Image (cartoon, rainbow, N blue to C red):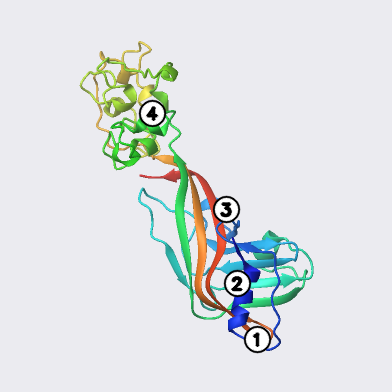
Amino acid sequence: MKNFFLIVLVSFSLFSCDDGDIIVTTFDFDEDATLTACREADEAVNTSDQLITLLYTTNTEPSESLSLSLSGTDFTGKFSGIEQQDSLVINLNQTNKIVYRTYDAPINGGEYFCNDIPPSQPRVLEEYSTTNGGQVILITTITAQDDNDGIPAEDEDLNGNGNYFDDDTDNDGIPNFLDIDDDNDNVLTLNELGSDIENGNYLDTDNDGIPDYLDDDDDGDGVITRYEDLNANANSSNPEEFILNPADDDTNQNGIPNYLDPEDTQSETIDVVKVNSISRDFRTIVRAQNITMENTANGEEIILETLVMGRLEVSSSDESLN
């Protein structure tokens, strides 16, 4: 772990200050330090979708904080799609800057940093702020993700090669372990498993050797399950607003929905599929490089080649991969 005191001490030994003061702190800045986010307020948008305007971490003994203000970025702490995203590089300037402060009493971080008008107390004793120049790198990765479809991810590795990303039964670009509907038949995988999955036995209505959750024609009648949803677009107020529920169509009224009944073969072309929403956990490591921090009161400078501020954790339960 890199202790801020040690970093500053080395910097002061290389770059003299007017009075020779040294910042003494118990802050430990590394990838394990927890960062908290302030976001743009928007009640119409999920919290995890709101843009992050500031990241901060605080300490109590002594009372101090380290913050990074963000302006003009689209950073939310997560990303969409399957592929890992490139790191976000932010140039430090008058609006995007890192600030270190000490206070005469403990602070409430959320109240202090995330309100439009911060409280007047506690009083700031000392402040160092980055000057123009240097960069902050935001490295966001996925630490956990699941489609919550009732099948363990390792069991969705159909070819058994250990690579979960190359198994995509319905060829929709979403690997099975992240696909809530593995065969794109608009019946969720979770609802096609049957009652004996603990013993590895999955429901196979037409006994063709393909379990229903991977079979786009569950009853083997030659009409794909998605096309047996006859009332999919029967929304009278908006015919284009698809209901997408094959389970509520039973033409011959025998208690068996058409998609599981080989005797019912009526069809309706439905090329719309359910939104694929999954849960994901993201982690962003925040690292600054080649920065100069200046004391706002007397102009003293601290030069740092690298400063790892910490990490931000973001969880989202409705990430769409369509």
Dot 2 crowding, Cα within 10 Å, few <14, some 14–19, many 20+ = some
* Disc 1 from disc 3: Cα separation: 47 Å
Mark 4: amino acid? Thr
Given contact means CB atoms under 8 Å apart, are the residues at marks 4 and 3 in contact? no
Label 1 sits on a secondary structure element that is loop
| Residue 118 appears in the rendering | yes
Given contact means CB atoms under 8 Å apart, are the residues at marks 1 and 3 in contact? no
* Disc 4 from disc 3: Cα separation: 32 Å
| Labels 1 and 3: the sequence-earlier one | 1
- Name the residue located 35 percent from the left edge and 51 percent from the top edge: 83
Rendering coords of residue 13 (x, y %): 61, 81
Viewer-nearest residue: 283 or 274 = 283
Residue linked to disc 4:
189
Q: Quadrant of the C terminus?
A: top left
Mark 3: amino acid? Glu
- Furthest toward the top, the residue is 254
Residue linked to disc 3:
43
Viewer-nearest residue: 141 or 265 = 141
| Labels 2 and 1: the sequence-earlier one | 2
Left or right of 71 on screen, residue 116: right
Mark 1: amino acid? Cys
Left or right of 12 on screen, residue 254: left
Q: For residue 7, which numbered disc appears in the image?
A: 2
**Is 2 located above or below residue 188 in the figure?**
below
Q: Nearer the viewer, mark 3 or mark 2?
A: 2
Which corner quadrant of the image does residue 274 belong to?
A: top left
| Labels 4 and 3: the sequence-earlier one | 3
Rendering coords of residue 22 (x, y %): 69, 78
* Disc 2 from disc 1: Cα separation: 15 Å
